[in-house]
Image (cartoon, rainbow, N blue to C red):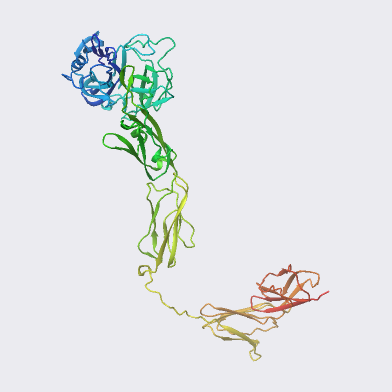
Amino acid sequence: MKTNFIYKIGGGLLTLLFFVFFNKITVFAQAPANSIAGGEFEYSFVSANQKNFDYKVTLHLYIKCLGGATPLTFNSPAFNNVMHDLNIQNVYCQLINVSTGGNIAMNLANTLAFNSVQTLPQKCVCENNSIYSGYRELIFTTTITIPFDTEFKFEMGGNNRAYSTTATAQAFYISAVLNNSNSFTNFNTYLKNNSVRFYKPLLVFKSAFGNSTFNFGGYDIDGDSLHYELVSPQISFTNNLTFNSGNSFNDNLTIHPLTGTLTVSSNTVGTYITAIKVSEYKKGILVGNIIKDITIQIFQDSQNTNPNLSGINNTANYTISIEVGTNLCFKIYASDAEGNQFVTLKPINFDRNIPNGYITLNGDGTTKDTATICITTTSADVGKQFCFILNAEDDACLKEGNNWQTLNGITEREYCINVIPGLPKLEIAVPPTICVKEKVVFDAALLNFNPMPTTLIWNFGDTTPVSAHGTHTYAHSGTYTISISIPAINGWKDTTIYKTIVVTNCAAFGCTTLSNITPTVVICPSVSVVHNPAIPNGNYEAIITGGSAPYTYNWYTPSVSPGLPSATITGNGTNTIAIAGSYSKVYLTITDANGCTTKWSNCVGFIANITPENINKTYWSSSVGQGVAPYVYNWAITGNNTLLAGQNPSSTNINAPIIKPYTLTLTVTDNYNCVTTKAVTVQAQ
């Protein structure tokens, strides 16, 4: 069952009501003329107990004390007593249960208690007989308990002050709504919501010249998304404030829906009113809003000069770039032309908009007129722009008619930081000792920030291919330059880092010292074959010198007589061939114990020819007969300076200018080291 209440505060001159009906809590107030110039509610989650919520409620009231007494202290902190001291009488505050017909459930007049007061700005006072007048901010707080799964609303009304665009004095009204009844199903997943906060009081003072922008620094400590809009001020729960014919709540006013920056373009001296509604969304669900009345006062302000805000590091630039993975600090300075005024800097939305930054305000102890901004970037920030607003405000008090009135000179500027791709600061980790034949793992670390890019190219400085991994084995000792390349991804500029290493021979990998080693020379056998008529049925004997016994002989005799077959004799120790018949060509292959092979032939009939033998031709080819392939061809031209020696094709094309006469010589060597030569002489014509 949902319980519905009304919190009600009221009286002859001030009425403050908290309504709760069908999940709603409402607050109303009424105030005397020229007293309340603005205000807002805040609520903060405190705790939850037995399906009830405890919330701290804060009420900010801005009192314009023009020529009247507004004390700095009060006889009692109770809300009723403070209203009495401010000459606001007959106040009542009570809790009403709408579901039971509007019965009064609780008297809350003494629970909303005074917390603090400050003059805006500090130089201007609100005292009787003072030449200065200004605004006071009164802060009241209380803690209330509301049922689980409710939507409640605070509303405050009062202040019958007239404005330049209203015909008569009308009531003042603000409200705040908290909706904690969405997106959860049980008490254990309740929504701990907090209202929007503002860095600055919602008061606007503008000179009657040009456009001015104001940002009150709205932020949400829960990280909820905020949406801003201008709405009509109200005088009660259901009624809007009535403007003069031709005027409205948004005359010459615009507001940015995401940043909340208010632009005032009117230059007509006077006092105006509007209201700002700020809605907060959590995961797309509306969880609360506040409506804040704002007084806008435009002065003929030739008596005051607004403060000056410098650019970044005292330049004319308001945007600066930073490479990803690096840190940046810069300064902004504020000053004022009037020597008797202090300037105070206030950052707006800095913490929310610059998540990895911080700001330090410094001054002479009385004023904070220098801001130092520092930011650290991560890989997720590449391509992003981070912006914040600085507000510089002096403490001038200027005369309005016959009275002195607060007029803070205000200057606001936006500063932006662009995060651009950066150069990685890379370090290659190398083991203290690197050995030949050792599997070495090189490592690389980013000094800017992590993580390390996954796409890397390693080059180990030897002849091996590049690798995507830092593991390598060196085959030889020596000095190498290794490198690692990072492509232009993840916000990095493409870059290559180098490092020199030394690879040595180590005992653990099979080598202790370097030694002079005398190689073993293996002498292959040489052979000569002689005709020996004394050998029966044979006529050839192989005589071997060198090599290592035993030897293997392979004799081959192709037939040159019709009807006689080829003969092959293979065996160990057989150095003669004795076969009946007529064999004009003999081939012998000898292999010794070391595997060295020597070949011999009697080279009978081995010839080479060159064609065509035509002095007008420059392209020559050859033919070979009675040899054993493969062949080695060597061409040469003699009689002039053109050489073809060392060329091994079976044909050649002479393209260079040739001086005649010349001799073209071809030398061919076959597989059994038989050599034949053919020469052609080309005469001059």
Which residue is drawn at the image coordinates 37% and 69% (left, top)? 506
Residue 365 figure quarter: top left
Q: Which residue does the image show at 29% across and 14% down from the upper left?
A: 34
Quadrant assignment, res 89: top left
Q: Position of residue 555 (x, y in %)?
A: 62, 80
Q: Is residue 285 visible?
A: yes
Taking the view exactly as shown, the residue that stands out farthest to the right is: 685
Q: Quadrant of residue 88?
A: top left
Q: In front: 242, or 406?
A: 406
Residue lying farthest to the left in this orientation: 75
Judging depth in this view, the residue of 599 and 539 nearest the camera is 599
Query: How far across and how far down the image is residue 221, in percent?
Result: 31, 30
How many marks do you count on the picture? 0
Work out whether residue 147 can be spotted.
no
Q: Position of residue 417 (x, y in %)?
A: 41, 38
* Image quarter (top left, top right, bottom left or bottom right) of the C terminus: bottom right
Instruction: Identify whether 658 is placed above or below 432.
Output: below
Quarter placement of the N terminus: top left
Front residue of 74/254: it is 74
Q: Is residue 209 left or right of residue 116?
A: right
* Location of residue 307 with respect to 326 vertically, above or below: above
Q: Is residue 233 above or below residue 216?
A: above
